[in-house]
Amino acid sequence: MSAPIVLLVLLAALLHAGWNALLRSGHDRLWSMTIMCIAVALASAAVALFLAPPASSSWVYAGLSAGLHVGYNLFLVRSYRVGDLGQTYPIARGTSPLLVTMAASVFAGERVGTGALLGIALVSGGIVFLAFKGRRLAVPSLPYALGTGCFIAAYSVVDGIGVRLSGAPMAYTAWMCALWGILMPFVFCALRGVGSLFTMRPGISTALIGGLVSLVAYGLVVYAMSKAPMGAVSALRETSVVFATLIGYFFLGETLTARKLLACSVIAIGTIAIG
């Protein structure tokens, strides 16, 4: 993986941790996530209108990914209901790199070198280690966090294949995100009712900004997957847990223990191996 791609993915990781911190700090997270998606839909549609459409063979992947992103949104919101950012986020993100690597091998015929595989294993292990308290995984929302990780792996592989078929990474990302952003308000209205969506709550500006940040973050990742192996990009992206741990400590009042620092060191070593 080239140095520019590594830097782009690390930037995406920082942005991703940032918008998750914004979501975690909100009071009504399902509403906040839906407002984020509306911002994503509007911005993506505006960009897509100025781009040539992606190849027709990639549209089915864009639609499938949009649906998987909605599932990811619902599981992520549910996992944050009772879990800290510094615990739930590592589990959700830590389960995906190895799943992406295996799925990319089966469905996209990717082969990853020994050094990159070692790096992926270190990143994944370090991320999951972050989620431990003492000698056990003490996370009430563990099933939802693990489910979130499975959704991440699924849409990452779908987008990795779709963007390569599209011939236009930016257009593919814009249309996929527009579809995703359009779907989420319908799901919210089905769960809560139309009136609830348009009931003003504190934090709407934060949610809108978070949506735009999430769009930029994932756009960088999709572009990187068009240039580098999906498993390696996925693992490198998950270094966002290091940023999330620091954000949780400095801004959300969460603890920063020696265990967390050790896990971050393991993640850093894995990142070097991947790069």
Image (tube, rainbow, N blue to C red):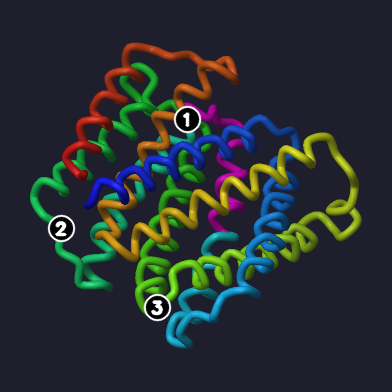
For the residue labelled by badge 3, is the local secondary structure a helix, a strand or a loop? loop
Q: Is residue 120 left or right of residue 128?
A: left
Q: Is residue 264 above or below residue 124?
A: above
Q: Mark 3 and mark 2: span between their CA atoms?
A: 23 Å
Specify which label sits upstream in the sequence, 2 or 1.
Answer: 2
Asked whether disc 3 touches disc 2, contact meaning CB atoms under 8 Å apart, the reply is no
Main secondary structure type of the part rendered in magenta? helix
For label 2, the SS is loop
Q: Is residue 111 positioned above or below 33 on the image?
A: below
- Magenta stretch holds residue 77: yes
Q: Is residue 209 magenta?
A: no
Q: Determine which of the numbered discs, if any, sits on residue 95 in the image.
A: none
In the rendered image, the vertical position of residue 240 relative to residue 162, given as above or below: above
Q: Nearer the viewer, residue 5 or 165?
A: 5
10 Å neighbourhood of mark 3: few (<14), some, or many (≥20)?
Answer: some
Q: Amino acid at mark 3?
A: Gly
Write down the residue under mark 3: 167
Give the extent of the magenta segment: 71-87
Q: Which residue is mark 1?
A: 244
Which residue is situated farthest in the left direction here? 114
Q: Quadrant of residue 176?
A: bottom right
Give the labeled residue for mark 2: 112
Query: Residue 262 at what x, y percent from top left?
Result: 27, 19
Residue 86 left/right relative to 37: left
- Which is more foreground, mark 1 or mark 3? 3
Secondary structure, mark 1, is: helix
Going by the numbered disc 1, the residue's amino acid type is: Ala
